[in-house]
Amino acid sequence: MVVDPALSEVRATRYKAKVESVSPKANRTAFEDADECFLGVSLENDSFDVPKLEGIVEWISRRFRRCTVLVGDSIHRLTLSATAALSPEPALARALELGREFIADRQPVFDLFSDRTDFTVVTCAEVRWWADHDGFHRRLRSQFAEDPVFRASVESFGRRYHSRGATDLDGQELAKRVAISSEYFLEEFAVFCCLRARGLSVMVYPGSFSSLAEVAEGAHPDAPRELRDLTVVSLQLKGR
């Protein structure tokens, strides 16, 4: 019998997912009453390698009947432009390619739990064409420009991310990367708004998402209602 390499990797190393935090805190247990969720996927992030993804998907399958897997392909071009110094067109082409590779390579993991949960994949590139996306994006960019508290939150999240990944960045390079990361988050938040507008109220992600958690907790009342109405479930993964 031929064993899928991805599943062999899953069996070699196992991870268990557990809830690290829920925003808003008032929904700490109530989020499990929902029938469906969406899983945010960041490309080239080791939290989504096969063994860890298996732990995440198993956790989801025990709680939700349906799950939309949101693959962050087109927005990953901004990460590539910041960290790999790619110009816009090559960065987008590479980001879309990485998205296709992720979907093909990780499908066996979702198939493992398809008897419990219906997993549907959607990409950020697809959502960007939805009718309401541009309106959400414009509103978020306007808030970023006009609301210093919201802007500081988004920039702080990007600054922590890049400072953690590269300690030798000079001030100018760090500022450039933070600006690119801010645009990444605004695009991503617009996509989240689109999903929430279609009834997906619970977002699952392996790791912290401080700016989004603040919005969910009510710290940024001028954010789109769809973003404020999200429940953000941050997972922690532990080997077993």
Image (tube, grey):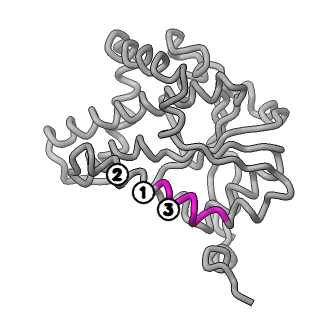
Q: Residue furthest bottom?
A: 1
Q: What kind of residue is marked 3?
A: Glu
Task: Read off the residue under disc 3.
Answer: 101
Q: Position of residue 211 (x, y in %)?
A: 48, 29
| Residue pictured at 37% horizontal, 11% vertical | 147
Q: Inspect the magenta stretch and tell me whether residue 105 lies in it.
A: yes
Would you place residue 45 above or below residue 74 in this image?
below
* Element under disc 3: helix
Task: State yes or no: discs 2 and 1 in contact (Cβ < 8 Å).
Answer: yes
Task: Read off the residue under disc 1.
Answer: 97
Answer left or right for 99 relative to 184: right
* Element under disc 1: helix
| Residue pictured at 60% horizontal, 19% vertical | 228
Task: State yes or no: discs 3 and 1 in contact (Cβ < 8 Å).
Answer: yes
* Element under disc 2: helix
Q: Inspect the magenta stretch and tell me whether residue 238 lies in it.
A: no
Instruction: Give the Cα distance between marks 3 and 1.
Output: 6 Å
Q: Residues within 10 Å of mark 1 (few under 14, many from 20)?
A: few
Task: Read off the residue under disc 2.
Answer: 93
